[in-house]
Amino acid sequence: MTGDWEPDPSDSLKTFGAFVQGLREHAGFTREEFARLVRFSVHTVTSIELGRRMPDSEFIERAEAALGNTGALRRAAKHLSRQPGLASWFRRWASLEGQAVSLCTYECRLVPGLLQSEAYVRAVCDNDIPPVPDDELEALVSARMERQKLLREKPRTTFDFVIEETLFVRRIGGVEVTRGLLDHVLAFCALRNVTLQIMPLASEHHACLAGPLQLLETPDGKWQAYAEGQESGRLITDRKEVSRLQMRYARLRSQALSPQDSVGLLERMRGAL
């Protein structure tokens, strides 16, 4: 997905970062010493302290242990914004993702953000015009990886993907990046709540030629959709319009390879690299 590329500044991230830096300096550690203690790179520690990167749970727990185990960082982390690195037009949909009981995605431009490897994200950004500044890139990568936790942390939510075969043929970032991407995607395919289907290049029928789309079902049984362009996105709630998109997606799934055949195709692609 492209809609979550441009980072949105987060005051909570900056505040948390300043808090980490203050505790670190009070304990008498340099960034280099602290980085060794928490087993993260100096670059990552710097990015967190400057509010450019969302700290993950491992960083918070290791930092707690290194800084006295007072519980202060754990409490502060609860107030972090969970949406740094998301464009303003995508934030509402990202919030709905976290509540959904079912999420369906069709993509024809890039491998969906929920399935992208970190190296693939960086390779995509290397092609972006104008170039993405380093601090924004780190916020973007952090946001993308944070969103992917949904697939493992919500085992009762079903995630269905239909992806064009050409997106894996293109090899954005080169062979090594593509190899890592395929490994990343195949690992997610092993989850029982994730289904992936490949839309083959040779298909003569295609129900979604109008472009990518996403659908989700809320806990109260309502369906909503999301459509995205290069510089904007649109949340769709009109029932008739959502119904049309559901019909297109259902037909597309019948035209795509089966989940088993899709995994087999990705494994053959991986083996050929």
Image: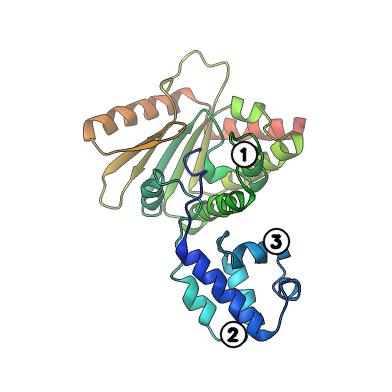
Q: Is residue 29 left or right of residue 259?
A: right
Label 2 sits on a secondary structure element that is loop
Label 1 sits on a secondary structure element that is loop
Q: Give amino acid for label 3.
A: His
Foreground of the two, 148 or 93: 93
Answer whether labels 1 and 2 touch (C-beta < 8 Å).
no
Can you say whether 27 is above or below 194 in the image? Answer: below
Q: Give amino acid for label 2.
A: Asn
Q: Nearer the viewer, mark 2 or mark 3?
A: 3
Label 3 sits on a secondary structure element that is helix
List x then y, in percent, for residue 1. Answer: 50, 38
Q: Nearer the viewer, mark 1 or mark 2?
A: 1
Marks 1 and 2, the one that precedes in the sequence = 2
Q: Give amino acid for label 1.
A: Pro
Can you say whether 269 is above or below 193 in the image? Answer: above
Q: Residue at x 60, y 49 (%)?
A: 137
The quadrant where residue 164 appears: top right
Per the image, the residue denoted by label 2 is 69
Marks 3 and 1, the one that precedes in the sequence = 3
List x then y, in percent, for residue 115. Answer: 56, 43
Per the image, the residue denoted by label 3 is 43
